[in-house]
Amino acid sequence: MSDKIKWVNKTSILFLGLALVILAFSACEQTQADAVNKKVIVLGFDGIDPQLLSKYMAEGRLPNFSKLAQTGDYKPLGTSIPPQSPVAWSNFITGMNPGGHGIFDFIHRDPAMMIPISSTTKTEGSNNTLKLGKWVIPLSSGHVKNLRQGKAFWNILEEHNVPTLVFKVPANFPPVESKGTTLSGMGTPDLLGTFGTFSFYTDDPPPNRDDISGGVVYPVEVVDNGFVANLVGPKNTFLSGKPDAVIPFQVWRDAENPTVQIEIQGKKILLQEKEWSDWLRVEFELLPAGLQSISGICRFYLKEVRPNMKLYVTPINIDPSDPALPLSTPAGYVEELQKCCGHFYTQGMPEDTKALSWGVFDYGDFHSQSANVLEERLRLFDHVYNDFHDGLMFFYFSSTDLNAHMFYNMIEPEHPSHDPELAAKFKDVIPGVYESVDAVVGKVLDSIDEETTLLVMSDHGFAPFRRAVNLNTWLLEKGYISLIDKEKQTKSEYYLNVDWTRTRVYGLGFNGLYVNLRGREANGFVTRSEKEKLLDEIAEKLLALRDPKNGNKIVDRVYRADEIYSGVNRLYSPDLVIGYNRGYRASWETTIGSFPEEWITDNMDPWSGDHCMAAELVPGIILSNKKIDAKSPKLYDLAPTILAQFGIEKTDEMVGYSIFK
């Protein structure tokens, strides 16, 4: 072969190789461009129930949901076990079950101290301080830690250069580090560090005022049609004893009209009866001479002027214009949002269900407040959606969940707290909220192109909560729990009266049951060889349990943790997860280790609907503008589904799969 031919062959091979490299690079560039230009919109409507949704669609009340179901697809969506919001949304975020992400309930326990603790966050104060007289100066900062484990799906998208916007997804406080835009949702505390503590000022305090949780009643004395009170803020950790930081304010009542004027920090607010103020920015001084202060926002509501003064103040929310805790990524996003949209609820669960449950609100008061929340969220949605151009957008609505919790007895004649007169007035609240979010679906449907994937989902459904099960009282009666002093059974909480040396199992949280296991619990004595037989025995008894009032089955199924959970955190799970039947749920007292006298009672609380039951009985919903190929889609399938829309493989830790082919 001549040198010329050899040179031609080598040159041809070189150019062919170069061409292949260019083609491969172009294909890679094209794939990346397609991923960036691709759009996925996820509308998260907490608690939308498939039975109610189908009913309202059939009645013609939800034209946009109906259109999406007909032109795309609609199926029930398998929820988490148990179907609790922080658990369910963690499944959604990570594509794992609780054994992977480590969130098993709203409430976990500290096995060393045997006390209930928050499942989602841990707060640590400064452990390095300097005391100067009455002042305590922190020399290092404290911090709040998000306890959810596993990588959020939007972090994976960001690794592949896909823009992300995640608005108020639950179980993301503080927001995990992200290159995208996120705003924290459920789990975000108020300025006091609680899930929401309202203030109520009245000259007619209720007799149970010291028992009220979720708020504080402040008795006032009206003199010459006025009174002076304090707005109570966070603990002042700069002072010994950590007293409350307070802001004094004055209220004057009009002598003839149902009107008051409120003066606070130089601002004057005029309110009529049943009227809400705008958001008010307040500043609590922590160190003198303006050296250190902290700001929050709140709204006043004039419930009643005469015959008694009744003034409600929302929990003091973290100020979005100057947040005291991290609320967003980037950190300045929440401030930018406030500048363009005004103040808004930063508290994770803004609707004040406790005010209604304790009688501070009536149903009309709560409805007006929840309407404020929904109106505010709709306004924020318009802003966020109008600014969205490519990548992923997730947007969350809480109103579909919390209104169902509080107004379910208006659509459930068999509920023990059903009042026909009230139901006539409020029976359209739940369908009305569904109609409001139907308009959101319509807005998106009318504006998306063929390259956009739309997912409309809820984390779980709903059921009536008619009867409350005091699980620990039942365990006590069956001899599984022993008390130190039987005479104090109903007077203690947080397990403070439990004799752990003679207690074999205990209930904690809304669905969990734990063995008092040797080597795990602080005073555990049940051996591992005894554990399995004990769990079988209790599961059998729970499944056989019948309601003495009507003979109904109380527990639909009992899940063994080792059969339903997988992942590195499985060992921290409850030993049994109790799946209550529709109509039944663990009592509020069960969640924190109390022992009411009776093991089952009628639920007369306005919190009349719930979902902390057997997962199979309260599925969520999934609708899409694309055909859903999965026969039984699950909540943890959605993270792999979203990744797949951008051509990204799911991680090995994810237990779900894409719902599309």
Image (cartoon, rainbow, N blue to C red):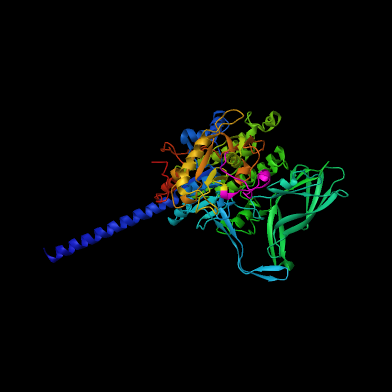
Residue 194 picture location, percent across and down? 64, 52
Q: Identify which residue is drawn at 49% across, 49% down.
A: 93
Q: Quarter-wise, where is residue 28 in the image? A: bottom left
73 and 563: which is toward the camera:
563
Residue 482 picture location, percent across and down? 60, 45
135 and 296: which is toward the camera:
135
- Magenta stretch containing residue 149, yes or no? no
Would residue 236 be seen by someone viewing this image from the given angle? yes
In the rendered view of the protein, which quadrant contains the N terminus? bottom left
- In this image, 130 relative to 23: left or right? right
Q: Is residue 251 above or below residue 588?
A: below
- In this image, 654 relative to 301: left or right? left
Would residue 638 be seen by someone viewing this image from the given angle? no
Q: Is residue 185 above or below residue 435?
A: below
Residue 200 picture location, percent across and down? 75, 48
Q: Is residue 142 above or below residue 561?
A: below
- In this image, 633 relative to 249: left or right? left
Q: Which residues are magenta?
A: 478-501
- Magenta stretch containing residue 481, yes or no? yes
